[in-house]
Amino acid sequence: MARAARDSHGQDSSDATITPYPDLLNTLIWNAIIERATDVHVHCVEEGVRVLHRVDGTIQPKLLLSLAEGRKLLNQLKSASGLTVTRSFAPLEGQLVWPDEDVRWEIRVTLTPVRGRESAHLRFLSVPRDEWDLSSLGFSMEDQERVSASMRSISGLVLITGATGSGKTTTMYSLASLLDLRAMTTYSIEDPVEFRLPYAQQIEVDERHGLTMHEGLRTILRMDPDLILVGEIRDKDSAIVAARAALSGRLVLATIHAQDAAGAVDALHYLGVPHHIIGDSLRLVIAQNLVRRLCTCCARPRDLSPEDRELFARLGAEAPESILQADGCMECNSYGYKGRTGIFEVVAVDDEIGTVISSGTHHRELLDCLRRKGVPSMAHDGLKKVAAGVTAMEEMSRVCGLGAGPDAARQPAPLAPLEMVTR
């Protein structure tokens, strides 16, 4: 049942690397890395313990362990992440490190009691330095120019907005990396600190000891910062302090939950920041989401349907002669997709837009203003990626709710559970 992992040359590598953890946990982690999973869920169910992977943003059921195997796995996970092995009646959080040949993985572990048993979640964190380049994230050349011009400002508020798991933190770090952090005093307040940013003083929220997001921000303002990174604006106090810090001559990068750029302004106002302060402090808004990239080995062309052509025309995007759709092959584990890229709406806030925001305009009116000024929507950016063969119309329909036409791609058949892997 077990098989040895093989390296890129097809050679047996089982003896090349010492197994850092017991076999069952070792197998769980290697399966996730091989599948490029960002999250692993270990759920207790009636039949035993169910393992699921989140690959490119979608959940993929993997295998079902017996109750005994599940308990053994959870005990190994607790021990490896520095947690007590005895059953807990409260949530637990820990971390373990996985030294791969090319990447050092930091795995954040959370366990919670469920109906007298326990379930676990593993978040795999590893961002190589070159992934902080804007082009690798999916920004077009035009959007890169808008971002770079805005980041040359020495003060103001920059908001990155989107749904949970849409890559906001990675974009925030990418924007910070455009600056010469060696010549700046840079502080961040995050919950938690997900990645290490060179030359930055990174503070992690610890509410059990009184270090809230708001208190962290207030402390940072007394530390003479040039650049402040806010992991997420989610309460009134933090929102007001961040906006006033931007007005007082600091450059503030922050994430906030909203569906589009106009929604980010609404979200900040709903948290208690007056419109005139938003209009005066805001310099740049980036709204984003992630779509899956088509597998280049198996994507196949299809003609555009009348609905597809109508959608391209309605959003002002140039329709190609044909587009690609997912199929499925061994290279992509039959998913039809491999990897993800971003779709973006980038708004550089000029005097006109700032005045409209300060006037207390409604969401629809601000959207109309942005479109009149030629700011393309996320859906428009996504359709450009569909036309370029980067993603499929069906994926855009899933992420943005756009029509996919009648010739929808077939869904890949469910995979059998992965073989147990040891290395």
Image (tube, helix red, strand yellow):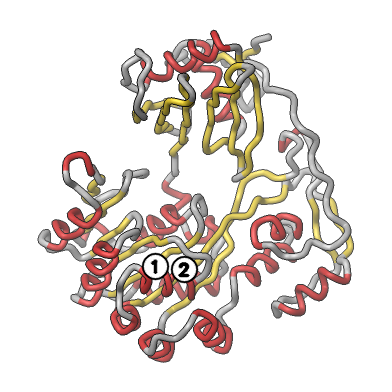
Residue lying furthest left in this view? 222
- Residue hosting label 2: 286
Quadrant where the image shows the N terminus = top right
75 vs 7, left or right, is left
Q: Work out whether 85 lies above or below 336.
A: above
Q: How far across and down, in percent of the image, does residue 355 sit?
A: 38, 90
Q: Which residue is drawn at 54% across and 74% down?
A: 142
Q: Looking at the image, do the residues carrying marks 2 and 1 touch, with CB atoms under 8 Å apart? A: yes
Which of the 4 quarters of the picture holds residue 51?
A: top right
Amino acid type assigned to the residue bearing label 2 in the image? Ile
- Residue hosting label 1: 159
34 vs 315, left or right, is left
Q: How far across and down, in percent of the image, does residue 62 sit?
A: 65, 26
Q: Residue at x 44, y 70 (%)?
A: 264
Q: How far across and down, in percent of the image, does residue 121 sit?
A: 47, 31
Label whose residue precedes the other's in the sequence (2 or 1): 1
